Amino acid sequence: MNAMTAKDMNAVLNRLLVLHHRSLPMYVSQATPWVGPGYEAAWEAVQSIAADHQMTSDRFGAMLLAADEVPAYGEFPMRYTALHDLALDYLLARIIDYERHLIRRIAECADLVRTSPAVQACVLESLGEAKAHLQLLEEVT
């Protein structure tokens, strides 16, 4: 099996960077939804997940910079604009779905970068975080 080229590896890192930096939890944390009584813990969880996504995207960005590649942060999907001014209890199911989607995408990327143990370790760390985030969200809903 051929090793992944540096260009291919950077494309995977950029994909992971965008998945985290432009994630639904990141968007919701910036859009500040209405948090009804009893949803304070869920709001704290979303904010914590968004902070973790920021740190993870920073790690992937640093790896790209170390490879002399310019990180491509992308834009939030336009469909997210329909989520403004909504209550957190409505958004939680969508955030859970996003985390499930994220887990699948990270797992795919981990398989792609298996020829680079350092990159794969970082990707697997983000996979573990995503799984922990999903569990946290399921506990607070």
Image: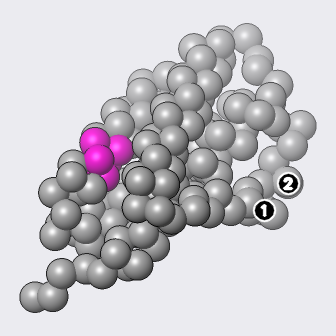
Q: Which amino acid does label 2 sit on?
A: Ala
Residue drawn where x is 81% and y is 36% of the image: 31
Q: Quadrant of the N terminus?
A: bottom left
Residue 66 coordinates in the image, percent (x, y)? 41, 54
Residue furthest out toward the bottom: 1
Check whether the beta carbons of the residues at disc 1 and disc 2 lie within 8 A of each other: yes
Q: Mark 2 points at which residue?
A: 82
At x 68% / y 62%, what residue is drawn? Answer: 74
Label 1, label 2: how far apart the Cα atoms are: 6 Å
Q: Which of 19 and 38 is in front in this view?
A: 19
Q: Disc 1 residue type?
A: Arg
Corner quadrant of residue 72: bottom right
Residue 93: image quadrant is top right
Residue at mark 1 = 79
Residue 81 visible in this rendered orientation of the protein: yes
| Residue 77 picture location, percent across and down | 73, 62
Extreme residue toward the right, this view:
85
Start-end of magenta stretch? 122-127
Q: Quadrant of residue 111?
A: bottom left
Relative to 134, say whether 39 is above or below: above
Nearer to the camera, 27 or 15:
15
Left or right? Give the position of 23 relative to 109: right
Q: Which of 120 and 36 is in front in this view?
A: 120
The dominant secondary structure in magenta is helix
107 relative to 53 in the view: left or right: left
Please give the label number shown on residue 113. Answer: none
Numbered-mark total: 2
Q: Up-down: is 2 above or below 30?
A: below
At numbered mark 2, what does the secondary structure look like: helix, strand or loop?
helix
Q: Could you say which is closer to the camera, residue 131 or residue 18?
A: 18
